[in-house]
Amino acid sequence: MIHFLNVIKRYEETGDVLRNISFNLERGEMAFLTGHSGAGKSTLLRLIAVMERCTRGQIIVDGHDLNLVRESQLPFIRRKMGFIYQDYKLLNDRTVFDNVALPLIIAGFSHQEVTRRVRAALEKVSLQGKEKKYPLALSGGEQQRVGIARAVVNKPPIIIADEPTGNLDPELSAEIMELFRQFQQVGVTILIATHDISLISQLNQRVLKLDHGQLVVN
Amino acid sequence: MKRVNKNRIKKDPPIKQVKQEKRQTTLAGGTFTDKLIAYRDIHAQALFSSLGRMIATPYSSIMTIAVLAISISLACGFYVVVVNIHQLTGNLQTSSQISLFLRDEVSDAHAKKMSESILNNQNVQKVDLISKDQALAEFKDYSGFGSAINALKKNPLPIVIQVLPKNTLTDKQGLADLLKKFQQMPEVDFAQFDLQWVERLQAIVEVAQVFAFLLNILLAAAVLFVIGNTVRLEFYGRRAEVVISKLVGATNAFICRPFLYTGFWIGFISGVSAWFIVTLLMLILRGSVERLSGLYEGDMHLQFLGFSETLFLISTSSILGILGGWVVLFCELRSNKL
C-alpha cells in the first residue's frame, strides 16, 4: 500500500533529512514510525501526503507513483488518506459536524449521504450528540477524536497519524490506539508517527525507527 | 529487502489508473443528479458564507466597498458628463458656411455689389447679405437685450455676408483657400467659418472622451488591486482552513470558490453603490443644469445612466471583483505549496 524505495529528501539549508529510505507497508498493516525529534518522521509523513516531493527515489501509494502524479491530481490522491495530527488541525469556527463533514463535502457527496456518514463516524469515535458543539468546547481527547472521525469519514484505505496521542493522557491514548486497531482490522493501512515508547510496546506492531534520516529498525 | 521491494513495485497497478479513479472518486456517493445537487449546494454555500463573512466584519467591508464605490462612481460620473456634453454638441452640425464681417465704413450698397461678385465665384453656392439693420433686429429678438440696444445711439453691428460654399468643395484645403481669399478682400474685417467653435468644442469633447477612457482603465486597475488585496488578506486570515481543506483532498477550485465569491460580492455591491452615488449626484445637479439650459433657451435634459449602462457598470465591477480575486489566488496557490 505504501512503498518507499531508496527515498532521499534533501533541503538546501539542512542537507539530507531522509537518506535512502526503503520500506513497504502492506494493505491492512499497522506500523509505528519512531525516532528522536528531528529524525525525519514528519518529513516522511509530508512526503506521503505529497505536501512535498522526494529529492530522489520512488514512493508508491496505493499504486500511484507520487513522483509522476500531477499537481491537479493530488487532491484525489489525498482523498485516499486520512490524516490525524497532534494539534488536531480542526476548524474552530465550525461545528464538530461541519469539521467531520469537510472531506465529504469536498468530495461532493449529497447532503443525506454526508449526514449519514458523519453520524456513523462520530458514533465510531463515541462522540454522538456532540455534532453541534464547537471544537474549543471539547476536551483534548474529544478534539482528537473529532480529528480521527474526520480522517476516517471518507473511508480511506490509508490512515496517517502524526503524534496522535502527544497531548493525551495514557488512558485516552490507549482508547485511541484501540480505535486504530479496529480500523486496521477492516483492512485500513495505518502509519503512526510517535515517540511514545510505552504505546508501541503495548500494541506489539511493526516499528520503523528513524535515526538521523536513516531507517535503522524495520 | 530491496529486491523484494522492486518486485512488488513492478506488480503494482499502472499509474494510468489515476485518471480512472479520479472519475470514480468524483462520482462516488450517488447518482449524477445527486452530484449536481451537491455541486449546487457547494456553490450556494460558498456564495452565502462569503457574504456572511463580509457582514461579520462590517467595518472593513464597508470601508473597502466605500473606496471602490467612490472610484467606480468617479469613472462613471466622468463618463456621464462626457455623454451629456456630447449630446449637447451632437445636435449642432458642423457647417462649412463662412461669415464675412465687413468693415464699419463699407456702405450697404457696396456690400450688395460685393455679395453679387462673390456669388460669381465658381466655388460659391449661395450668398446672404445681412445688413446692419437686419442684424440689429435679429440681435434684439434673440438676445433679450432689446431695451439696452435701443439706448445705443449708433448701431454697433457690422454688415455680414454669409457665404455657403458649393457642396463639391469638401476638402479642408479648398475651404481654407476660399476663406483666405475672402480674408484678403479690403472690405472684409475678418472672415471665419461659422460654428467653428462647435468643431472646437467637439474636439475638446473628444479629448475628454479619450481621457475618460484612460481614466476608466486606471480606475478599473485600482478596483482590481483593491479587491485583489482584500481577497489576499482574507486568504491569509483563513490560511488554516485552506491548509486543512487541501489536506483532506480539496481541489484548488474548491479552495478558491469562497474567495472568488468574496471578490464577486465586493465588486457587485461596490457597483450598485456607485450607481446610487452617481444617480444621487445627478439628481442634485439636475435642477441647476435645467436652469442653465433654460437661460440659453436650450432644450437640454440631463441624461442619467440607462438600463444597459447600469447593467454594464454592475457586471463590470462584479467581473473585476472575481478577476482581482482570481489573479491573487492563482499567484498564492502557485507560490504556496502548503
Image (cartoon, grey):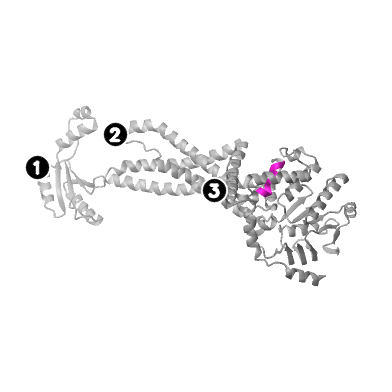
Q: Which residues are magenta?
A: A96-104
Is residue B32 in view? yes
Residue A156 in the image: state x and y as whole percent: 72, 54
Name the foreground residue: A122 vs A8: A122
A132 vs B207, left or right, is right
Q: Reply yes or no: does residue A101 show up in magenta.
A: yes
Tell which of A47 and B200 is nearer to you: A47
**SS for callout 1:** helix
Same chain shared by disc 1 and disc 2: yes
Residue on which disc 2 sits: B296
Locate residue B311 relative to residue A192 in the image: left or right. Answer: left
The CA distance from mark 3 to mark 2 is 47 Å
Name which residue lies at 70% across and 56% down.
A78
Identify the mark at residue B109; answer none if there is no mark: 1
Callouts 3 and 2 on one subunit: yes
Q: Amino acid at mark 2?
A: Tyr
Give the residue number, with chain letter if any, for mark 3. Answer: B322
Q: What chain does mark 1 sit on?
A: B
Do the numbered discs 1 and 2 sit on residues whose CB atoms are within 8 Å? no
> If you read the primary sequence from the N terminus, does the residue marked by circle 3 or circle 1 appear first?
1
Label 2: element kind: loop
Residue B153: give x, y in percent of width and height. 17, 30
| Mark toward the viewer: 1 or 2 | 2
